[in-house]
Amino acid sequence: MSRSLVARNVNILRSQRMSFLRPQRLWTHGLATLASEAPVDSSFRIPVIDFSKYLHATSLAEKRRTADEVVNGFKEVGFIYLDGHGIPASKVNQAFAKSADFFRLPSEVKDKLAWEDPRSNRGYVKIGRERVTQSDDPQEIASLRAQAPDYKESMEIGRDWDKTWKNQWPQESDVPGYKQTMLDFFQTCHELHTIVMRSIALGLDLDEMFFEDKIHEQYHNLRLLSYPSIKTSRLQLDGQARAGAHSDYGTLTLLFQDSVGGLEVQNPHTKQFQPAHPLPGTIVVNAGDLLARWSNDVLRSTLHRVVAPAALKTGDLEGMTPARQSIAFFCNPNGGAEISCLPNCHGPGNEKKYSPVTTEAYIVGRLSATYS
């Protein structure tokens, strides 16, 4: 796609105001503000779905039962826990181990791999450079970033065969095995994304393979995240967060959490944030903006944030919020795919809410505003 077309589509968005086998349970590997003071709502529930029933189904009717659970979860909450997803715990643990190895590198080494361009969305993002928010106003975001940037660092990895944009890999001697681990994990997550999208198609009364030729180019982003330990008092400053309230941009996000916790999801009905505690062996999966646009908001792209869990006391005068890790795989449609309302998600009394947009234009527009 030409740069001029991307820019034109971004301007349109701004004018609209962007209104497998069961794994071993070995890992509990997020995305932080202090924990919500709102009382826990016992009626709010993120469903836990045994996806092995879909993976091993012997009939379309069996698949449809699990597909309905998946789609209902995205309709009601926008989030699900995926159990029985087929990604071995050993593979997740290896990805977390190599991610930790990377973030332990000296700053001068990591800074040489710096993120540079929203069209690429690859490379290292140091603490303070990103400010996630729902705003689409660049000046407002710049002000928020200056006042209270997100307190985290990340490494962004895309498809490695892209002819235009290249991944930023450290030297093999600096992190042995890192590159191959992440390439393997990227492919594994893409394959799971493809199967989950088949279940969503069935749950929306579409052909199971409806999305197949719209997501096969692997226009995804693997994000490694590190949240350093921080004095809790710093997170009590106005607007300060590890990751502020936001929705994700693509179709789905596969989130692998550690055991520290801190992810909160906004109850779509009460608008209060509720905890999404780590459940060992599961993946937190949420619908993103482009899937919501595709479905005319039948499927929810729900606000979420990462908050500081209870402080660990390190002395009488100062509490510390513990360090944490997470890995997010942001699943996207093909870059040039046109995202327009699905044929069975609009009709009399249910008009189309969004103008068509390409994946690349939408995501580049959001990233351009998010980073400094």
Image: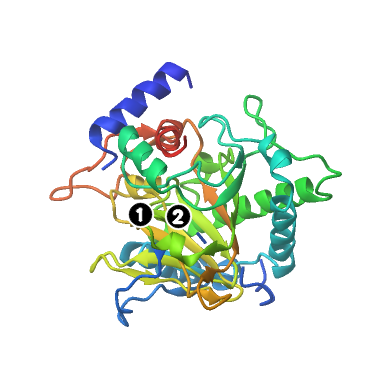
Say left or right for 156 vs 308. right
Please state which of residues 364 and 202 is positioned toward the viewer in this rendering: 364
Q: Which mark, by number, is residue 239?
A: 1
Residue 306 makes an appearance in the image:
no
Q: Amino acid at mark 2?
A: Ala
Q: From the viewer's perspective, is residue 8 above or below residue 140?
A: above
Circles 1 and 2: CB atoms closer than 8 Å: no
Q: Which mark, by number, is residue 64?
A: none
* Picture residue at 22% right of the left edge, 43% below the top: 353
Question: Going by the picture, which residue comes out furthest to the left?
Answer: 349
Q: Amino acid at mark 1?
A: Gly
Q: Position of residue 197 (x, y in %)?
A: 49, 54
Q: Position of residue 242 (x, y in %)?
A: 47, 56
Q: Nearer the viewer, mark 1 or mark 2?
A: 1
Q: Position of residue 202 (x, y in %)?
A: 43, 58
Secondary structure at numbered mark 2: strand
Residue 330 makes an appearance in the image:
yes
* Picture residue at 52% right of the left edge, 40% below the top: 213
* Picture residue at 59% right of the left edge, 54% below the top: 225
Q: Quadrant of residue 89?
A: bottom right
Q: From the viewer's perspective, is residue 28 above or below residue 165?
A: below
Please state which of residues 86 and 106 is positioned toward the viewer in this rendering: 106
Secondary structure at numbered mark 1: loop
Q: CA distance from mark 1 to mark 2?
A: 10 Å
Q: How many numbered badges does the structure rendering display?
A: 2
The residue wearing badge 2 is: 243
